[in-house]
Structure formats: structure tokens, C-alpha cells
Image: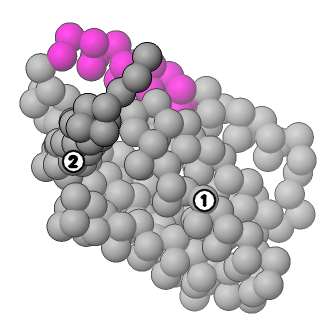
Amino acid sequence: MNISPNEAEEALAAIQKVTQKTRRSVASSGAYIFLIITGLVWLVGFLATQFLTGDIVGYIWTGMTILGTALSIPLGARISRRVHNPSVGAIARRAVLFWVFLILCGIATIAVTRPTDGKQATMIIILFIMIGQMAMGMLTSFSSVWWTLPVVILALIGYFLLPGYFYLWMAILGGGGMIALAFYYRSRW
């Protein structure tokens, strides 16, 4: 089968058009707001962990996680209503089930490995979250996967090279990075 240069150019142009349309759809869907919410949870939680001590840190993480979840659930429902595809509900249920199983596996991993300090437990949690983000991204759009690898690399750099500033590192580069990425998605896509 021979393809002329004109046919090849037309095919590439069609692919680029679909890619751009998909990006615009993702950017205008409001999905970037989930990155802002998660970024804020990480920013506040990790700053609290770096600079505060005692039970207040656990209360802040719990409060921020509950707030993030409380914001994300109705937002997700609102976004899914805008998508006129009957399979969205089934996909959403599978995604929720995936995250439940991943969280249970993360808890089991922490129970089995018995981390010796909070940084080890935090690193395991970060790795599981990024694995989940990678899996979700690969199912929806490869373009939403790339950012997870730098987060993992930065987390490992902070964990091994900056242990005294690990939580501050994760607040700024993890949480702040997600917030910056959300604004990038919104403005550049």
C-alpha cells in the first residue's frame, strides 16, 4: 500500500486536529480543578508536617483530605453530567473501585513493610498515588501521564538527598507543582 505525500500530510493534520480538540476538551471540562484541589491538600498538609508537631498535623491532614474529597465528589458529578456518554457512569464506578483497591493495597503494603518513620510511610503513599495517577492517565490520555514521573523523581530526590526538608520539598514541588500544572493545562491547552 502506497501513500502519497499529500495523503500522509492530510492524515497527520487530522491526527493533530483530534489531539488539539481532545486537549481543549480536557482543559474546558474543569478536570484541572482536581489538580488544584489535590495540590492544595498536599501544600497545606506537607507544610503542616514540616513546621508543626503533635496531633495537630494529623488533624490538618484529615481535615484537608475530607475537604478535598468533599469538593471533588460534587465536582466530579457535575463534570460527568456534561459528558453525554452512557459509558461514563460505568467508567467512573470502575475508577472509584480502582482507587479503593489501590488504597487498600497501599495500607497493606505499609502494614507489611512497617516503615520506621513518617517519611518512609509518606514515600510509600506518594508512590501509590502516582501509580494510580499513571494508571488513570494511561486509560484516559497519555498526555496526562507525563507529570507523574517528575513528581516521583522529585519525591525520591527529596527523600534521599534532603531528608530534613522532605516535607517542605513535597509541599512546594509536589503540591505547588500540581497547582502550577493545573493552571498550565487551563491556559495552554
Determine whether 111 is above or below 39 in the image.
above
* Secondary structure at numbered mark 1: helix
- Quarter of the figure with the C terminus: bottom left
Residue 90 magenta-highlighted: yes
Give the residue drawn at x 43%, y 17%.
Answer: 1
Q: Where is residue 51 in the image (x, y as percent from the top left)?
A: 57, 88
Give the residue drawn at x 37%, y 19%.
Answer: 91
Name the disc covering residue 129, or none: none
- Dominant SS type (magenta): helix
Q: Where is residue 152 in the image (x, y as percent from the top left)?
A: 65, 62
Q: As shown in the figure, which amino acid type bears the numbered disc 1? A: Leu
| Range shown magenta | 85-100
Q: Where is residue 12 in the image (x, y as percent from the top left)?
A: 29, 40
- Density class for disc 1 (Cα within 10 Å; few <14, some 14-19, many ≥20) is few
* Secondary structure at numbered mark 2: helix
Q: Position of residue 119 (x, y in %)?
A: 75, 69
Give the residue drawn at x 70%, y 40%.
Answer: 106
Foreground residue among 167 and 157: 157
Give the residue drawn at x 53%, y 32%.
Answer: 99
- Mark 2 and mark 1 lie on one chain; the one further toward the N terminus is 2
Q: How far apart are marks 2 and 1 (CA)?
A: 23 Å
Determine whether 20 is above or below 182 in the image.
above
Q: Can residue 71 be seen in this snapshot?
A: no
- Density class for disc 2 (Cα within 10 Å; few <14, some 14-19, many ≥20) is few
Name the disc covering residue 149, or none: 1
Q: Which quadrant of the figure has residue 153?
A: bottom right
Name the disc covering residue 20, or none: 2
Q: Can residue 68 be seen in this snapshot?
A: yes
Residue 150 magenta-highlighted: no
Side of 27 relative to 146 (left or right) = left
Q: As shown in the figure, which amino acid type bears the numbered disc 2? A: Gln
